Every structure is written in C-alpha cells, then in structure tokens.
Image (cartoon, helix red, strand yellow):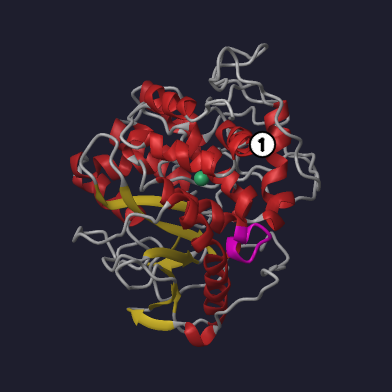
Amino acid sequence: MAAGTWRRAFVAFVAFAIAACETATPPAAPSMAPTGSSSPSLTKPPGQTASAETPTPGRTAGFESPQPSGPPPAPDSDPTSADLIEAALAAGTIDAPTALLYRVYSTFSDLRLPEEYRTPVSAGDDWAMFQAQTTIDTLPPEIAAELRPFLARPTARESVFHGAAATSYLPLADPFAPQLVLPALGNPYGPGNFVCDVGSWGHIEGGTTLAGGPAWKVWGVCNDTASINDVVKAAGYMELLYGAEVALMGPPKPDTGGGVDEAGDGALDVYLISSCVSRAGRCMGTEFRTDRGILAYAQVTAPCDSDAAARCSSFIVIPRATIVSPLGASTVAHELFHTLEFNHNAYGLFASGDGNWFMEASSVWSEHYFYPAGRPAAVHPRFSGFQSGPFGLSDTAGLNEYDSYVWPLFMEQLGGKAKIAAAWQKIEGQAGNEAIDAAIDGTMVPPA
Ligand SMILES: [Zn+2]
C-alpha cells in the first residue's frame, strides 16, 4: 500500500508545518468559487499532478521545526520511515504485524525502530495508531504487547508515558524560548488547584457537564513543580476555549460506559506528558518533540456507538514542550475541536482507509477562529501552503488537509461559524469519504 494511504490521522496529530514564508496579516479570502452548482470544489484544480505521492516543492511535511525562524527546510523529497517500512513489507522482508509495529515506533521515533527505517523525513504516520487500536486483538501477542503501551492513557501504568520519573524535558533541546502568552483576561487557575490523585498523577479540573461533574481535567505528574505549572497553563487554555468550542459543536462524548480504557467520570481528559519518560531504563518517545512536527494528538477511545460511523469518546495527549511554546493555545484549540468532531463521527471518517480531509481542515479552522492571537504562528503559514500546494482540497497527500482549512474559512465567510457546525451535523452517520464529502457539499447552499 502506498505510504500516503497510511498517513492520515485517526490519532489526529497536529503536525504543524511552517512554510518558509510567514505573514503576520490575516490571509486573504480564498478565491475558490464553487465549481458547477453550489458544490465545493473537492476535485483537483487544474495543473495538479496526478500523483498524490509527489512531494510538494517548498512545503514541509512534518519533522520540521515549528520555529518561525531559521533556514527554510529542505523539500520533502526523501522517503519517509513509513515509505521504507511499506517497501520492506512489500518485499517480504518483514510481515504485516511487524510493519505496523515499526510504523508506530516511527511515529514516536522510538529507539527500537531498526536503523534502516529511520529517516529525518517523516510526515507523521498517524494512521498507524488507528490501525493499531482497531486490530490490537488480532495481532500476535508479542506485537500487541509492544503496541499497547502506546495506546494506553498516559496515567495508565502500562503507558509509554507513565512513570514517576517525569524527567521534564530531558533530551529536549527546548526549541522554543518559553514565551507563554496567556490570554489578557488572565488565568483563573494556579498551582493550588492541582490535586494529586491517581498514582503519581494529578489534575486541575474545570467546566461543568450537564450531569454536574467537571467538564474537563488536565493531567500531569505530581511532585514536579515545573510540570504542575504547565498544567496550570493548559488549564487556562481549556478555560478559555472549552466553552466557546462546545457552544458551537456540542460537547465531547463522555468517557462513561465501563470500557477498559476509560477514565470513566465523563470529563474530557487532557494529559500533559514529558517528551521523554525513563521507563525500565530506556527513554521512550525521545523524539516525540515539537521540532519533529508532532505537537499533540487526540485519541479516540471507548465508548463508541456501534454503527459504521460510530461517534466516540476521546482523550488528548500534549507534550509539555508544546504547552509552553507559542503554539500552545492553538494546539489546545485544535485537539479540543477533534474531540468534538469525534462526537459527531469518528469511525466513519476513516471508512475509506484514510482519514477524511475535513477533520484536520476543521480543526485548523478552529485554531483560526477560537484563538486569533495564535494565527501568525500556527495558522497563517498554512495559507501559503495552500497557495503553493498542487493538491485539491480533499487530497490528504502531505499535510494538504491542514492547509485545506481555507475551505471551512470560506464556509465561515459565507454563512458564519454555524456553517462548520452544520457540516459536522450532516457528517453524522456518514461513512467513507464519498458520503462525507457529499454531506459537506450539502451545507454549501447559496447564502440567502
Ligand atoms: Zn489534527
């Protein structure tokens, strides 16, 4: 299978790619008039290459520094780790379960990935996490045992991110000068709101569900002042963003229901992890860091509805280095939006074997809409990606689906933010890209 097919995100990574050119001014209105009737142009624009695998000149595709300074990254012309692993699978060098394990290793740049599959070029093989999650019970026991720690909640003892060590930013040559910009209204939370409760982990909670419990919890390790301070920052962002996003999209699906991988209290869980946790004497996920393109992810988990377009609960994992970076609040906005998307549709987004483009496009749009202060660093560079990219809106080659935030931006200009929420309501119950794209089309009725 072509590598591009594997690359989309169920575990929906924010793989921010910063183009060489950055602007501090808002992007112009996308000039993409719907073709034909009132349907959005989801087909390839004129001049586009036929191959979705063709690297996009001048664009980055993960593994690039989100730092807005420095030399422009090299074009993504070398094979990714996923490419190399898939080639080995095709050649019969490794079997399918091993290939999946290697792709998960690659996702986290785990040191157990054999040398020959390592490459500085990766776009985040996030589809591997979805495949691992959905096939875990059918895999050979030794492969499944290696994969489960990547799928578990960070507070779970078996998680790759669990551990009292919580070695702050151990190998991370902090790519950012910590320059947190909290919202002007201030952060209502402080270290005094942090409660130690699960093993070595604790949390700050906020919001209120209809059932009366906390709407969200931000988790971090106890007995680590720096980590607790980062939890305070993340809680401030959740306070700022949760109510506004939920007012538009509805709440996330509560994690109640009794599954094995649920916190169970109905609150949306946000886990702050250190980029390296020493576990059994080895450093796990050492390259899971912000200068490798992966900033955070939202992971779907039980409970899910049982249909093909199942709506699911989910949780969020964010490295602490992301939270203290200039992209911290934008990243919270993005991942939070994914959890709200997944309460409209989760499995249906991947029924075509590849995550639907609108999932990432909408989440990038949410950064733009809900955290305007983050646009210069987090969103505007994507507009030049859209302008220079050869791909159609719905193409998920490279990081094209992130750049396709221009379409929901256009929807917003056409009918307000409610257009995006309406699209997600129409996506409910739809499985596969064709049905989902048709549902999005259905929201694009001409303005009255
Ligand atoms: Zn995303």
Q: Residue furthest front?
A: 448
Q: Is residue 194 above or below residue 311?
A: below
User: Which residue is at the front of the view, 5 or 163?
Assistant: 5
Tag 1's secondary structure? loop
Would residue 414 be seen by someone viewing this image from the given angle? yes
For badge 1, the amino acid type reads Thr
Q: Is residue 391 above or below residue 417?
A: above
Q: Is residue 86 above or below residue 246?
A: above
Q: Which percent across, then down, holds residue 357?
A: 50, 32
Q: Which residue is mark 1?
A: 60
Q: Which percent across, then down, holds residue 285?
A: 47, 56
Magenta residues span 322-329
Residue 381: name its quadrant: top right
User: Which residue is at the front of the view, 378 or 84?
Assistant: 378
Task: Determine whether, in the image, residue 104 is placed left or right of residue 157.
Answer: right
Give the crowd class for mark 1: few <14, some 14-19, many >=20 residues within 10 Å. many
State the quadrant of the C terminus: top right
